[in-house]
Image (cartoon, coloured by chain):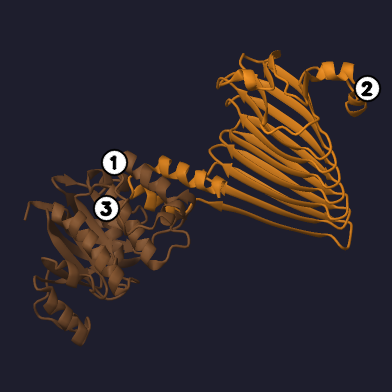
Amino acid sequence: MGKILLKIEKLKVRVNEKDILNGVNLRIKGGEIQALLGPNASGKSTLVQVILGNPKYKIFEGKIFFGEKEITKFSPEKRVKLGMALAWQNPPQIKGVKFSELLEKISILKGSTSKYRFREVEPQLLEREVNVGFSGGEKKIAELLQILSLNPKLVIFDEIDSGLDIKRLAMVAKIIKKELVDKGVSVLLITHLGQILQFLKPNLTNIMVNGKIICKESDFRKVLRTIKKYGYEKCKKCKFLAG
Amino acid sequence: MKNVKNVNFWQVNHKIKNIFERRGVKVLPSPKAWEKFNWVRKILKEKPKEGYFIWVKKTINLPLEACVSIASLKISQNLTNLLVIEKGIKAKVNAVCNATKNNLYATHKAKGKLILKEGVFLEYNHIHKWGEKDFVSPDYEFVLEKNSRLIYNYQNLFPPENLELKTAIHSEKNASSNLNFVINSLNSKIKIKDTVFLEGKNSQTVVRLKLVGRKNSQIEAMSQIFAEAPGKGHLDCQGLLVDKTAKISLIPQLVCQNKEAQITHEASIGKISEEELTYLRMRGLTEKEAIDLIVAGFLEK
């Protein structure tokens, strides 16, 4: 495992007078796979949007570092330039813009070659407008293709396993492994149900409840077993809560 | 301009640079056509100062090209253009009007009459590219005789400081028109008025306006359909406000004077979605690049 790539310290975010993140601490090393699990509305998606610099969210306490740099106030594009990438859970439609056009634009910006010519991609997808009428599975593939064009050092997948059947999930996991994990890219998997973990086997699994990471566990199977049996309620009562 | 030899009419400032006729197509400066043909004098009451006359008498496979440019400071053009297409002919015309430099403080006034005789099909692509300080006022009238069909695409992605665009369409029996206006604004004042008269039985029209309001711009667009006969028409006006200093006013107007006519409209003005913008920025595009891509998509769709 490499040096620490992403470091989040005591991050607090408030939206419309409501505390969404209540002091999140997280560290991800180079080449590491981590998972972040949590119930609905626990703050997972807000956290990843904040990590990538979504201007909608204002940080009122805490810091984010990427590599050696503090990036708390960096614009999203500057973070992407440094090597961060996020695959959205519900990507918006960009009407009138062909998906191939967007991929080319990203590739030119990043000086990467277009990597979207693998077998799994139906050519018609490239000719369609970005995310317009895409099925759940198509959206995930489209996100993955964009991520690969970004040549990232760290990729955050927000619920990449939601809405995918088992066959598609296996295929997506295979691409993530081959194109990212095997090449030393760090991965953070945000997941509600945890299906993808069986395929990608994270080094560390974090549990988030009420805007705080309350548990860090190296055995993801143990976490999944507990959640399956007791739900997240058990985590809230756990006496070994992480700080 | 590339391949100028193939441009059927090419004028720069007040000088005609090229006239190229094809078999079955007469091309002249409009003042000369006025002197030469009696019937032209009946259509154009006053002798034109400058402009083109294109008379299509046979179907040709290649598009006809007309180009009027301004290349010098403070030039003031006053054009009268006449395009006549004889019965049953299918034609395509690409007309480009532009300023070759950005700060020429030029004026381009154009009055045009386009006559589509019975059964004609015309695709007319009207492209404008202006400098930031120009004043531009095109006023075009189309006469669609029975069974004729017009596709008119007006595109202005490089707007002048002032644009007053007037378009009128007269449609006889079974004539149909499809009008598409795509207009960008930046430090501009733009007034648009397009009117379609459904004068003959079963005449039809679909009018689409796509307007983008950028920094320090005001756009006023009035889009009208007058149904005097049992025809069908639809207006679709869409505006996109990109900057907080921009203003767009859309006024769709339907006037129905025949109980069997069906005319409808829809109009909307929206802003750029913050979510789309953030999404594209998380793909590495700057805010400006992201806005440009969203605007290009809006104009494309």
SS label for mark 3: strand
Q: Is residue B204 left or right of residue A31?
A: right
Say which mark, if any, is on residue B38.
2
Q: Nearer the viewer, mark 3 or mark 2?
A: 2
Taking depth in this image into account, of B293 and B25 the one nearest to the observer is B25
Q: Residue at x 80, y 46 (%)?
A: B196
**Rendered image quadrant of residue A212:** bottom left
Q: Residues within 10 Å of mark 1 (few under 14, many from 20)?
A: some
Measured from the top left, where is residue B219 in percent x and y? Answer: 64, 41
Q: CA gap, disc 2 to disc 1?
A: 64 Å
Letter of the chain shown brown in the rendering: A
Q: Residues within 10 Å of mark 2 (few under 14, many from 20)?
A: few
Measured from the top left, where is residue B28 in percent x and y? Answer: 78, 19
**Rendered image quadrant of residue A190:** bottom left
Taking depth in this image into account, of A142 and B148 the one nearest to the observer is B148
Measured from the top left, where is residue A178 in percent x and y? Answer: 19, 57
Q: Residue at x 27, y 51 (%)?
A: A148
Q: Residues within 10 Å of mark 3 (few under 14, many from 20)?
A: many
Q: Is residue B190 left or right of residue A102?
A: right
Q: Are marks 2 and 1 on the same chain?
A: no
Taking depth in this image into account, of B212 and B19 the one nearest to the observer is B19
Q: Is residue B296 visible?
A: yes
- Tag 2–tag 1 contact (CB < 8 Å): no
Please state which amino acid type lies under the numbered disc 2. Asn
Rendering colour (chain B): orange
Determine which residue is flagged by label 1: A110
Chain under callout 1: A
